[in-house]
Image: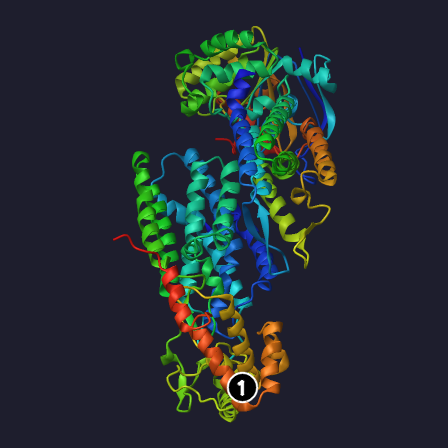
Amino acid sequence: MRWYLAARRWWLTVVVAVLVVVTAGVLASATVGVPRALSGVDFPLPLSVLAPCLVAWLAQWNMTRGEPDQEAIAVRTPPAYDLALLGVVVFSQIVAAVITMAWVPSAESLMVVRNTMGYIAVGVLVARVVGPVLANLAVMLVPLGCAAFGATVTAAGDREYAWWAWPLHDGSGWTAWVFVAGLGVVASASMLTRRRPGQLRASRIRLLIE
Amino acid sequence: MPPVGVVLRGSWAPWALPVVAIFIAVYAADSPPVDDRYWVSATAAGVLLMIFVAPACAVCAAWDGFRSRRLERAVGIPVRSPIRLMLNVCWPVGLLGLAALGLSLWLYLPPGGTPGGPEPRIVGVFILLLAAHTAVGYVVGRLLPVVMAVPLVAIGSYLLGAMPPAMEPVWLRHIVGTGLDTCCWLDEVPDPAALWAPVLFYGAALVAVVGFALLRPAWRIVAVLPLAVSGVVAVRLVAPMDWTPTQPRPMADASCYDAEPELCIWPEQHRVADDVRVWAAEPLERLDAAGLEYPPELDPLSFDVTGLDPDRVRATVAAHLMPSVVCENGVTDVFFDTEDRVAGWLHLTVGVSDAGVESVIPVDALRQSRAVHEHMAPPEQLNWYRSELDVLSACGFADPAQAADQAAVNTPERDE
Amino acid sequence: MSLTLDSIVFGYRRKSLVFDGLSLGFDAKATVVLGPNGAGKSTLLGVAVTALRPRAGTVGLDGLDPQGRSGVRQFRRRIAWIPQHVTAVPGLRVREQVAYCGWLKGMTRSAAWDASESALDRVRLTDLASRPSGQLSGGQLRRMAIAQGLVHDADYIVMDEPTAGLDPGQRHVFRELVADLRETAAVVVSTHQTEDLTSMYDDVVVLADGRVRQHGDMASFLAVAPGDTRPEQRVEAAYARLVVRED
């Protein structure tokens, strides 16, 4: 386990995950303008929606570090360890969110935890098909795409989101949590399933580390 | 140089091109030029599309950086210089940027017969912007694990384009070039400072990348120096500017007709020049009938858009008559209310249509202006107009003396 | 001991198959797999060690079927895989990386750490044990890869081009190593090196275009060579005849 941890460097992701929660809580009002499609108006995307991407990217990076050929025929199951460590990342975020919410009362911290889980799940699923590099690009496009296509601002200035634009939903909205839970289950199952022939080969992953 | 097919096969640029083209096509309609019949404006409108193009270039270059690093490991120490290697693998990214730039220019192409062509200085800024994003993406792709490098340059490049326009201080948007999105009405040209600032910023980024590639690792920190220095210079250049990156267009560009007032037509308006002279005569006659003389000291009368019609000309004449008051010690709410009333009355007096007036004057002010215009005799209207001008010149204070007192209050006392 | 592949169908893409019903058994103490580039040697060995999953067909080791979690684990415990490409794991030293592979094979941490020392000793890499694996040269990396395969005392050791990038001295060490290994385990090696094949291996498999062109003992392989071939050229002549004959 020690060498597995040394190779994967999950500690870095845990640290960043905690920092993202704290930063999002403190900078709750910070936004990035995302041009909404066919409206000519920017949507102010909160940093708390964008920042969890960093955790998901790092998680992909963690999972590409190792000895892919030996892990492919290992007796132990590195994907199961990866899944457990992803759980540690999320758990550390939950702890950080609880502490942050006591310090800065806001629902942003919960949003960050939920979005981190969702982005990691999207990353895992896309990486299964096209590899971790494009998966990380896809993760980035999730919040930007939701802001561009799934957000509307009413005449009264209220924001409304499409049901599928879960990263933008409030931390207390159950729809988004259900969505993320579903993604998480599917992603976890896919991690524990052996790859079929023709899917990403270990030799291709090898080129991505370092 | 590697064969073209080999480079293209490994590059992401050919795959990115259709994606970028779709983004440009979708968003081009959302960010139309300020004036679509003015080449400068049509060229500058592309800056918002660069928010998508630049990250695409950076991402493709990061992938190329990763590939070149991998290649070096496979073949050993290369004979070519790092810059040559970069150019050898990144040229498809350059073509991607140029194709995207060309597409954005094509989408905003002014109608045939519009004098001039794409504004070369703005195009130059765009090319430099894309080159800098590409170069930085390549270096990041060489330095970081590709799994992190690709998304990091994508989001970094996107944020560099998308965040400054929404941030204070204002110079942030000018230094990265996105301020050009409000350039330019027909009577405006880009402020040279707004062009030099991004040139300095992105040029220095390129120099930094070159330095980074050529210097030994221990000396690479030195490569950041040009970026810091030129960043400071660029900030000093644009610090005095407000949101608009423009300055008045030189009157030498216009054809002016000797009239009262002097009437100037921009080259883009030549098709309607004769009409404009006719359309401008009518509101001036109305002013004359109302007893208002067009002040001879006013600048020549010119128009800020190409799409002119009689109502627009009337409105321009009315707007031209609004006094420009310098209020060093601020103004009161009365000033703004008065300004709206005066503007409303002038618009009504020169004969601007109801729809035209209602589009520029607040409802309450317009109601009062209408009351004056419709129920007072012409001499009374003139007296009312002059008394309102006095209020404006006093910056909204009840009388000049009060304004002076207020000025004294507003002026901080100095410790002797 | 026998490592068998039965009716293997494998392809990386939907329509192009590398193997379409390939059956093969490795039951000698030392088998060499020969074949031109792209013949499918690495894929064959990848399937044999369960690194790659066939679309159809089965792999077995002494009757052990790698189906289900328990079956896969038992299978993989008994087999070692030394792939063609070697990855230096950033953050790990040479001995740690070798020990990590032992740990992946189900050994306890202390057992893997102890075994890593003897594995490195067998490939003459002990003096570099504490160096970061990323700092090794190509030949040293390859020796580390061999050590990774040796660390858990497998019954079957499958090596893909293990001598690529090794200098003549290191190749000599490798030949000694194979001779040593075959005392305790069965060895399957794919290679392009034809020197000393006759003394090192018992069986020969010649693979081309995803099909087995020849499988048998060394004598039957050498018999394929034309009768007038000089003894030192018989291996190459037989190989050329088998590969070229049906092309």
Instruction: Identify the colour scheme used.
Output: rainbow
Residue B68 seen anywhere in this rendered image of the structure: no
Residue C31 image position (x, y, % from top left): 59, 17
Relative vertical location of residue B244 with respect to residue C61 in this rendering, above or below: below
Q: Which residue is mark 1?
A: B381
Chain letter of disc 1 in the image: B
Residue B79, by quadrant, is top left
The amino acid beneath tag 1 is Gln
Give the SS element for disc 1. Answer: helix
Task: Compare residues B410 and B29 and report the one nearer the observer.
Answer: B410
Residue pictured at 55% horizontal, 17% vertical: C101
Q: Is C36 left, or right, of B260 in this rendering?
A: right
Q: Residues within 10 Å of mark 1 (few under 14, many from 20)?
A: some
Total marks shown come to 1
- Residue lying farthest to the left in this orientation: B416
Task: Compare residues B35 and B106 and report the one nearer the observer.
Answer: B35
Task: Compare residues B36 and B206 and report the one nearer the observer.
Answer: B36
Relative vertical location of residue B393 with respect to residue A164 in this rendering, above or below: below
Residue A105 seen anywhere in this rendered image of the structure: yes
Relative vertical location of residue C139 with respect to residue C118 in this rendering, above or below: below
Residue A63 image position (x, y, % from top left): 57, 29
Task: Compare residues B398 and C4 and report the one nearer the observer.
Answer: B398
Residue pictured at 36% horizontal, 65% vertical: B192
Residue pictured at 52% horizontal, 32% vertical: A19
Residue B321 image position (x, y, % from top left): 46, 81
Residue B166 image position (x, y, % from top left): 51, 53
Relative vertical location of residue C82 with respect to residue A61 in this rendering, above or below: above
